[in-house]
Amino acid sequence: MIRKYWRLSWAVLAILSLSACQSAYYSAMEKVGIHKRDIMVDRVEAARDAQQDAKEEFSSALDQFQQMFGKQDTDLQDQYDELNAAYEDSQDAADDVSKRIDAVEDVSEALFDEWEEELNLYTSSKLRQDSANKLRETKRKYASLIGAMRAAEKRMEPVLNALRDQVLYLKHNLNARAIDGLKGELKSVETNVARLIKDMEKSIAESEAFIAELQKS
């Protein structure tokens, strides 16, 4: 029981430490003229670019998977190596997307908290209300953006799982029948990748609209 509480205490301390580090980072950036909104725009752009890269990596992996069935004369070990490399690149791209989305969420929370607090500094009720309305609208658009990002992120896992299954199956059955065994999975992978790309494109479009809105206001 004591160990359990110690582990919980360390977890809480780690979270508090990370939060303190982020606060110190934002404060330091503001001292050199880079505000949370600037950081948010930068991170949304980075998340958008990461999703674009992931879309291309998953498309490439699907292409590699499809081509495998037309390379009957190619050494099976080479086919495994190529498909495994495509899977690993897709996994790296997916990890980067998740990391970038987390970074967007972190700065957005700090930005909105600061905005909420600063509403109390207004002496003009009209200006306060106008700012509060803008905050509410920005939050609404942000919710749509982060929802699209997370939806696209969730689509990556089943595709990665399917690709990993194909890689493992080919690795464990390096013979001609292994290729035939994978053919039945091709349609499922194609469908999942198509859905993923559709969600990625929606999320990328949401990102670009949100960036434009922040830069305009």
Image (cartoon, rainbow, N blue to C red):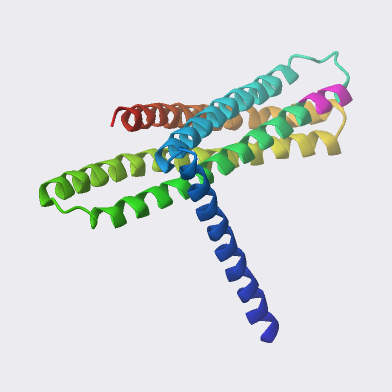
Q: Position of residue 85 (x, y in %)?
A: 77, 28
Q: Magenta part mainly helix, strand or loop?
A: helix
Describe residue 100's horizontal placement relative to residue 199 as left or right: right
Left or right side of 26 for 73 = right
Which quadrant does the N terminus fall into? bottom right
Where is residue 121 drawn, in percent x and y?
24, 55
Question: Which residue is most to the bottom?
Answer: 1
Residue 49, picture quadrant: top right
Q: Residue at x 80, y 31 (%)?
A: 178
Quadrant that contains the C terminus? top left
Does 177 lie within the magenta span? Answer: no
* 40 w.r.t. 55: above or below: below
Q: Is residue 155 visible?
A: yes
Residue segment shown in magenta = 77-82
Q: Is residue 193 visible?
A: no
Residue in front for this viewpoint, 207 or 31: 31
x then y, percent, for residue 75: 88, 19
Q: How many marks?
A: 0
* Residue beneath the point at 30% across and 27% down: 216
- Looking at the picture, tell me which residue is in the foreground, 120 or 199: 120
Question: Could you say which is closer to the camera, residue 160 or residue 128?
Answer: 128
Across and down, in percent, residue 119 comes to: 24, 53
In the displayed orientation, state which residue is furthest to the front. Answer: 31
Where 177 sits versus 30, above or below?
A: above
Out of 199 and 28, give the one closest to the viewer: 28
